[in-house]
Image: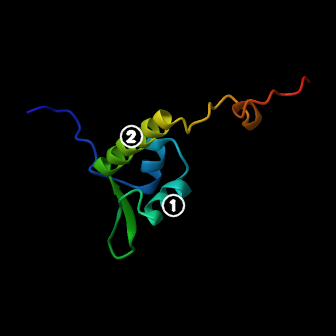
Amino acid sequence: MTDEPRPHRFLTIEQAAEELNVKASLIRGLIKTGELRALQVGSRGMWRVGSQDVEDYIADAYRRTAERIAAGDLEDEGKSDSESLGQQKPPL
């Protein structure tokens, strides 16, 4: 038996947001659209997100991203919209 702390099975919305490095409002939106599974607990209906559900969301996001890359649907983050369309930026 090890003395390592067991990871939490459920996260608050704020903890899930921290895990994904996003705002809590985005997590709430993902829950509302069904993209991220969550459940309400207690008489106050506090939201909890399963740790595994966060991991599943990440794995699905990687899969979707890989599909978009393969299809040529992603732009480089460092490029502006005009550059990604083959247009040059005017000199400053």
Describe residue 79's horizontal placement relative to residue 60 as left or right: right
Task: Mark 1: give few (<14), some (14-19) or many (20+) Cα within 10 Å.
Answer: few
Q: Quadrant of the C terminus?
A: top right
Above or below — where is 26 with respect to 20? below
Q: Earlier in the sequence, mark 1 or mark 2?
A: 1
Q: CA distance from mark 1 to mark 2?
A: 20 Å
> Where is residue 50 shown, x and y percent of the image?
31, 53
Q: Quadrant of residue 45?
A: bottom left
Q: Secondary structure at mark 1?
A: helix
Describe residue 54's horizontal placement relative to residue 29 as left or right: left
Describe residue 83's horizontal placement relative to residue 56 as left or right: right
> Where is residue 29 shown, x and y percent of the image?
51, 61
Which residue is at 41% across, 38% downward? 62
Q: Residue furthest right?
A: 92
Above or below — where is 13 with respect to 47? above
Instruction: Tell me the amino acid under the disc marked 1.
Output: Gly
Q: Residue furthest left?
A: 1
Q: Which residue is mark 2?
A: 63
What is the number of callouts on the image? 2
> Where is residue 37 shown, x and y percent of the image?
35, 59
Return the mark for residue 29: 1
